[in-house]
Structures are given as C-alpha cells and as structure tokens.
Image (cartoon, rainbow, N blue to C red):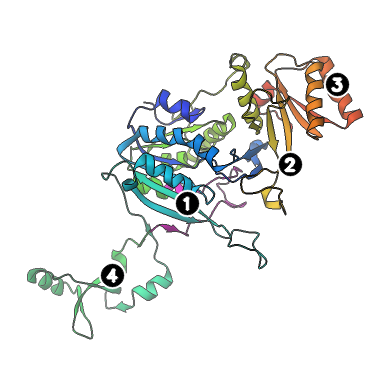
Amino acid sequence: METNVIYCGDNLEVMPKYIPDESVDLIYIDPPFNTSRKYEVFWGEAQERRAFEDRFGDAMTYLDWMRPRIRELYRVLKPTGSFYYHCDWHASHYIKVELDRVCGFDNFRSEVVWNRGNPGGRTAMARRFGNNHDYILFYTKSKDYRFNPQYLPLTEEYLKTKYRLHDERGYFQDVRLQNPPADVLERLKAENRVYVTAKGSIRLKRYVEETQGRIVDSLWSDIPPINSQARERLGYPTQKPLALLERIVKASSSEGDIVLDAFCGCGTTLEAAAKLKRRWIGIDLSPTACRVMAQRLEERLGVKEGVDFQVRDMPKTQDDLRRMPHFEFQNWAVIALGGIPNRVKVGDYGIDGRLYVADVSKEKKPDRDLFGEIDNWYPIQVKQQDRAGRPDLDKFETAMRRDKRLRGYFIAFGFSGDATKEIKRANREDGLDIVPITVKELLDHERVAV
C-alpha cells in the first residue's frame, strides 16, 4: 500500500481499490455537514472562486450517503486503530447511532466538544442559544488501542489555586499518599517530599516543574477556529485549525503510523500527519482541492510532489476527460467549476448543476428551513463535445428563462462561431449573461470570476 499520497476521487471507489483491510492506524474525517449552508470563497493566491454546498436535502439522504463510507472506513481500520468523526449539531445524533452500529457501542470512547468561540450574529432578541461548537466522535475498533494523553499549559489562575503551598524548592500541591510502605515513606521524608498538614496527615509534595500540565478532557475550548487573519488560512470554508488535528494525531498515533483522511478538503490532516512524522493517505473528490493540498504541503513543509508525496488519479488531459463516461464527466466539470451536480441525471431539463453564491455571513433572513435551500444560484450546463453549437445555447437559454436565472455557465471543450454570436446576442437583447468556459480553462485554472 502506498502512503504519502493524495487520491483524487470518490472515497467509496478509492478505498476498495487502494487500501487493504485493517491497514490504517488512525482515521479522521470531516465530511460535508448536513447544514444546507452555501459558501463563496477564494482559494489562496490562485484567486479561484469556488462555491461549496453541503449537499444533502435531509438527514436520511445524508445517512444513506455516509453509511457505505463508514463501513469502508471501518474495514481499513486496524484492530488497534482509532476513528474520529467530526460533525456538527445537525447530524451528530444520527451519526452517533450509525457509528454505534458499525463500530460497536462498547468501542465508543469519547464525545469531544470543540468550542469554536463566538457563534456570531446572536443578539438579545435571539430565540435560541447560539450554536458555537462541533462534535468529534471518537471510536476504536477494539479495547486494544493506542492513546497518548495530551496536556494543556498551566494558567496563572490554575497555578494560584492548585499550587498555593511553597518551600525552599518552589511551589507545590499536596497529594494524598495511598498507604505507602514504611521504607518508601522514610525515603520520601529523607528527600523532603512529604508535607504534614495542620491536622497531622502526611501528604506528598508535587512541584510545578514535575507536572506535564493540565490533562485535556472532552471539552476543547483552547483551540480557536480559523479567522480571516490566520496565517494558515487558505480560504476553504470549513477549514479546521492545524492545532486541532495535531492534538488528534498525537493522541491516537505514533511516529511511522498511517493516518487516513477520506474527506481531506484543503489538507489540514495531511499537514499535521506529515509534520508529526506519520505516514498519510488523503482522498478528495475535488481536483481543485487536491491541487490546493499539494501546494500547501510544498509551501508549508518544504516537501516536493513526485519526490516526497504523490497525487494520483487527477484528470490530466482533455483526452482523459473525453474518455470519461458522460455522467462522470458532467460531475467532474460541475465540481471543477465549484458547483453542485444534479443528483438526477435524466430529465434535468437542461441544467446539469448549480453554482451557489449565497454568503452565509451576510444573510439576514435566508429563505430556508433546517434542510431547505437558498435560492441564490446559477445554472450550469455541460456538454462533452468539441464544439457546443447554437442549438445547445438555445436550450440552455430556455432553461434559464424557465428558472428565472439571468446568469449561467456553459462548459464544453469548445464553442462554434454561431454559439459565440448567440451568447453575445442573448446578453445584448435578452439580458442573459451566459459565461462560456472551456475544459482547458478548468484544467489550467483560467476561470472567469463568478
């Protein structure tokens, strides 16, 4: 099995193809949350605008999509391995039940609550408490697993309350002695390691310099989220802080172990694993995300693609894409643009995907319920042909008018002269803004900004 590799593809297809049974020491995943949130962001210096949507309309659809992936992840996990599932309040209770079924209730270890700080947008007029935390569900495959306790630095307040006593050596706290043998007690007295309280009980001195810190429990409030000024910020909408992943990697693996992230997004897990001298495997469906990951590893860790790590199964040429099955090519093109492919491929009435442009931070009263949709989107049409023609544009214009869209994106390998003329005419006379994008532009990042 290859390690230090990024696979571009659906993890449900990649894992059976490349990852053997019980071969991975640690799995962390941060799959799309079931929140119906839409994002519009820029990817780092490339300034490639990309829209993201959590892709599921209801909880049961989300679970149906995740269930076979959870089983695949369980298959590749070693008997001594650990599995961390990162989710939020929308789906955590559903996912917990599913993980209990697959991993076993007795193998549930912790429900970590990551406090992300100020939830924002909450006022005295709000009618609920702000949701400012995520859940990280921690499972193992058996009772025989690795766990390395993690520690927090001691704060001044903690030192003042817990280390109030002092002698010539320094500040200490007194700890109960559990009936030590007489010889041990005499040795501790000789070393000035015991303390006699006002009531005459004998206690052990534990000095500040002897403690590793305050042990980390299941409430993590010391790691802030990625903000707009963070040096590690890449513009990925659900990017997690490196410190969060470093804690998980340190806690549940050792140097040389294999770490898998099957929804690796912008590559935070991969950076943490590589930095801590673990071997790693990353999987993501998006070719853009895979390119960002590779660039991130090179720039932040000084490693080189093709030498220190590999990127596999990326669409490389237009000929590769011409040979793709039609619907697979449609999915690739829509995702590469930053959109969401239609689930229904037959009877889509001329629209193969949607590019959402809602800015969650600016929304006042979004027209949606818990699993609803925001109406601010652009249609995407994809043609796997060398020259999209005037008839193709006519059908797309009809679809745009039907859905009351004034802007849309048309992807093809090329466009005929008549098609180009029609795009100009539709804009000039009908007010329809159709953006033609070639496959070469998608491959080369030569996109027109949304």
Residue 285: horizontal and vertical position, in percent? 54, 30
Say which label, 3 or 1, has the lower sequence index: 1
Q: Is residue 90 magenta?
A: no
Residue range in magenta is 217-246
Please tell me which residue is depicted at 33% across the width and 29% down the height of the picture.
21
Rendered image quadrant of residue 73: top left
The answer to whether marks 1 and 4 mark residues whose Cβ atoms lie closer than 8 Å is no
Q: Which mark is residue 207?
A: 4
User: Would residue 238 be found to the left or right of residue 252 on screen?
Assistant: right
Q: Residue 307: percent from the left, percent from the top? A: 45, 27
Q: Which residue is mark 3?
A: 422
| x then y, percent, for residue 121 | 66, 59
User: Does residue 450 show up?
Assistant: no
**Nearer to the camera, 243 or 403:** 403
Give the mark, 1 or 2, whose residue is nearer the N terminus: 1
Q: Which residue is mark 1?
A: 135
Main SS of residues in magenta: loop
Whichever of callouts 3 and 2 sits on the residue coming sooner in the sequence is 2
- Pick whichever of labels 4 and 2 is earlier in the sequence: 4
Asked whether, in this view, residue 333 is left or right of residue 131, the answer is: right
